[in-house]
Amino acid sequence: MPQARSLAVALQMDPLEAVKVDADTTFMMAMEAQNRGHRLWVYGPERLALEADGAAVRLFARARSVRIRPVQGEHADFGPEERVDLGRMDVILMRQDPPFDLAYITATHLLERIQPHTLVVNDPASVRNAPEKLFVLGYPELTPPTLVSRDPLAIADFRARHGDIVLKPLYFGAGSGVARVKADDPNLDALLELHGQLGREPVIAQSFLPAVTQGDKRILLIDGEPVGGINRVPAAGQIRSNMAVGGRAEPVELDARDREICAAIGPELKRRGLLFVGIDVIGGMLTEVNVTSPTGAQQLKRFGGADAATALWDRIEAIRSAPSTGR
């Protein structure tokens, strides 16, 4: 196979200086790109600037070129900050973490201006239109009973019918604000008041799945196809399995139910240009479809599973070399 040409790749992400090089999925993606000879720039979404001038509309970012190495604390050598025309980039990895707020949504609108001439991963319009906790509701046969509302009476009625429930902020990530509310817990109203102070968005209420104590599978899909998964086990006495809040990763094999779920949602992910996705499965039930900055790739490889970063860059290079998108 001929050597892929060197691509100009920009990383739109939270500060690179703060990542854990032995755990961070974005760092793994960047390392794979660099190893393939691609050139890297990095910037935060607050550095974006969309400018209209005459007949042209162009998207810029104040970005820095970067060389990376897997040595914590010495993992990035930056060039000087420069004004980069993102329309001249080959690939942008949009990898900043939630909250999925208006700033995040605005960034998707800006990046949509240069897609698909510049390949944005994941497709910004699809990221905007597939909120991670709402996307699953397109597949009710795969999910636990779920309610989306900010109406306290509707949420109380849902709990009365389903018993123990889990409350989640609609647009946060990494397990932030997730709480189990038992059938006889008197604190439901107080929790809803706290959620209301965070914003006007509805909350997600889902029937509690006792199987979460055995773990929450994170399954990674590349262009709609599963490449493997890890099991994230919550700490003793906890229900949140996210590694950012103390969950423990362990190896796991995908079973028939996992593959059934992937087969059901995979074609839609592919159609939408969602190249790198992480889904969460608890007790055989789909609970979230993560499209912003899903994690777990380093742990998957460490446990002897597939190299998701390699699979992703194989796909990106194939897209960039296709006659319709190559430059």
Image (spheres, rainbow, N blue to C red):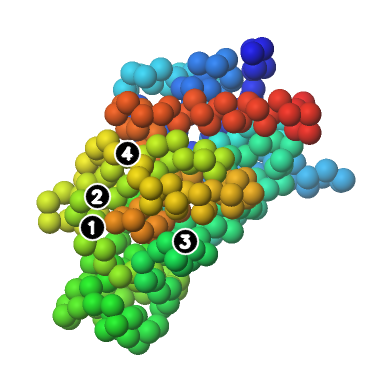
Residue 234 visible? The answer is yes
Give the x, y percent position of residue 190: 24, 78
Horizontal side, residue 66 vs residue 297: left or right: right
Q: Mark 4 points at which residue?
A: 253
Q: In which quarter of the image is the C terminus?
A: top right
Q: Mark 1 points at which residue?
A: 211
Q: Where residue 215 is drawn, which disc sits there?
A: 2
Residue depicted at x 52% and y 53%: 265
Give the x, y percent position of residue 59: 70, 41
Q: How far apart are marks 3 and 2 (CA)?
A: 19 Å
Q: How far apart are marks 1 and 2 (CA)?
A: 7 Å
* Rendering quarter of residue 182: bottom left
Amino acid tagged 4: Glu
* Rendering quarter of residue 252: top left
Sequence-wise, the earlier of marks 4 and 3 is 3
Q: Residues within 10 Å of mark 4 (few under 14, many from 20)?
A: few
Q: In which quarter of the image is the N terminus?
A: top right
Sequence-wise, the earlier of marks 1 and 3 is 3
Q: Disc 3 vs disc 2: Cβ atoms closer than 8 Å?
A: no
Q: How crowded is mark 2: few (under 14 residues within 10 Å), some or many (20 or more)?
A: many
Q: Mark 3 points at which residue?
A: 136
Amino acid tagged 1: Ala
- In front of the other: 86 or 241: 241
Q: Distance between the residues labelled 4 and 1?
A: 16 Å
Answer above or below: position of 31 versus 148.
above
Give the x, y percent position of residue 14: 44, 40
Residue depicted at x 64% and y 49%: 271
Sequence-wise, the earlier of marks 4 and 1 is 1
Amino acid tagged 2: Gly
Residue 171 visible? The answer is no
